[in-house]
Image: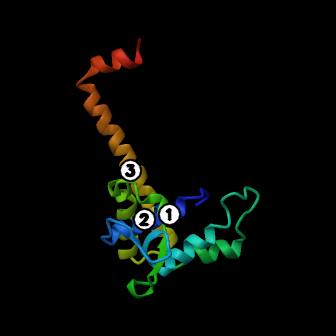
Amino acid sequence: MQSPDENQHVARAYLLAHGDLTLSTLPSRNSGGWVDGGLVSFINGYMTLPGHPARHLSASERAQLDNTPWQGEGSRVYFEIPGTGYYLPLAYLPHAVGLRAGEWAGLSVDRSYRLARMAVLLACLGLLAWSFHCSARRHWCWRCCCFR
């Protein structure tokens, strides 16, 4: 969670996991959606890090964030995520699957986030393997593009 916009992408994945394909807009607010209060607490805890490379979380801050629970449907708060509205929701599908699976399994927000990152890694490796499989049938393409 050290990149400045990671918070927005995680929130967008959460919205997709809960069936929100598009963002909404409240009067006088940026585009966003209704996100679990536990996830918002988790995100806000890490937002002290981007832009401050010397800043580190203390052990107690880290322990608190590691154990942040999901708060459930009744705790949703409006979270602005205007930088993600133009991305195809399909890009967030692996994140969404991981977050939703973690929520369903009763994991903390941190563990669910880690599960989402693992789902993204597996999706990337699967796409890479599939691309190699497809290109193996077109070996002439590799010769032309990579082995001149």
Q: Which mark is residue 127?
A: none
Q: Residue furthest right?
A: 54
Mark 3 or 2: in front is 2
Q: Is residue 106 left or right of residue 19?
A: right
Q: Residues within 10 Å of mark 1 (few under 14, many from 20)?
A: some
Residue type beneath disc 1: Gln
- Distance between the Cα atoms at labels 1 and 2? 6 Å
Indicate the quadrant where residue 127 lies: top left
Q: Residues within 10 Å of mark 2 (few under 14, many from 20)?
A: many
Q: Which residue is mark 3?
A: 122
Q: Is residue 74 left or right of residue 141?
A: right
Whole-percent x, y for residue 64 in the image: 62, 78
Whole-percent x, y for residue 51 in the image: 69, 57
- Distance between the Cα atoms at labels 3 and 1? 22 Å
Q: Residue at x 45, y 86 (%)?
A: 75
Mark 3 or 1: in front is 1
Any part of residue 98 in sight: yes
Q: Is residue 71 left or right of residue 128?
A: right
Whole-percent x, y for residue 15 in the image: 38, 69
Whole-percent x, y for residue 56 in the image: 72, 63
Q: Residues at badges 1 and 2 in contact (C-beta under 8 Å)? A: yes
Residue type beneath disc 2: Arg
Indicate the quadrant where residue 148 lies: top left
Q: Nearer the viewer, residue 85 or 62?
A: 85
Q: Which residue is mark 2?
A: 12
Q: Which residue is mark 1?
A: 8
